[in-house]
Amino acid sequence: TSGGRTIHLDSAQPDYYANPLPAGGAALDAVDVGLGTEADYAGRDVKGKAVFIYSMLGVQEQGAVKRADEKGAAAIFEVSMLPGNMRYEAYPSGTKAPAFTVGNDDGTAARQLIEAAGSMPAKVKVSLDVQKVPDLKTALVWGTLKGATDETIYITAHKDGWFDSASDNAGGVAAMLGLAEYYAKIPQAKRRRPIVFVGLDGHHNGP
């Protein structure tokens, strides 16, 4: 929010394992640090602020998110400059401050609001409530179709999903089951290779 204008960052998605914010969220001054290099921080105080960083595939990794955290940011928004307003999940940021990914359209709108704010900083209202449940157990499942040789084929699909689970990865699980169903109807003598079908217990859940 700035100058009576408010935008909503609809694409904002917390990083995997992001830490929560205090109950009720926070209202923070917004600051834009470009690519988030040391040069971008020169003369800038980001402690206790919402920091916006911009990144793009092909641009050298700058360690910008961790740098923002080390400099005391209260919340970090990493904007992907790919065209559109992509919503995606990032791997753990390893930061104390909650980190979010943001699509390009939202990130551009935020930057323009920060630019127009002048001496009165734009404000970001952000909340993140996280419940972490330890010691849950999961398992992978598998099935094998024997073949005529020992040259084994493995087909895998992960069973976990986040917010677009129909495509990531229910579609993959369905494709794997369809292949198993198809090849199970072929006699073993005509299946040249054994096929092992594995339903992974979560490719985002560590080793």
Image: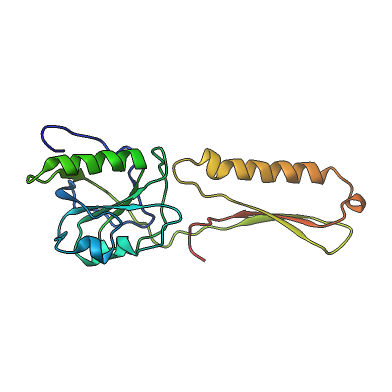
Q: Nearer the viewer, residue 198 or 46?
A: 46
Where residue 13 sits: x, y (%)?
35, 46
Residue at left offset 23%, top offset 35%: 7
Q: Is residue 43 above or below residue 199?
A: below
**Vertically, is 96 above or below 15?**
below
Q: Nearer the viewer, residue 55 or 181?
A: 55
Quadrant of the image containing the N terminus: top left
Q: Is residue 33 left or right of residue 119?
A: right
At 20% across and 65% down in the image, what residue appears?
71
Residue at 14% x, 61% y is 45
Which quarter of the picture shows residue 38? bottom left
Tag count in the figure?
0
Name the foreground residue: 195 vs 123.
Answer: 123
Q: Which residue shows up at 22% across the image and 40% down it? A: 112
In the figure, is residue 109 to the left or right of 183? left
Q: Position of residue 120 (x, y in %)?
A: 7, 44
Along the horizontal axis of the image, is 155 left or right of 105? right
- Figure check: 149 above or below 25: below
Q: Nearer the viewer, residue 186 or 64?
A: 64
> Looking at this rendering, what residue extends furthest in the front direction?
39
Q: Is residue 180 left or right of residue 109?
A: right
User: How far across and how far down the image is residue 50, in percent?
Assistant: 20, 52
Q: Residue furthest right?
A: 189
Residue 169, percent across and down?
56, 45
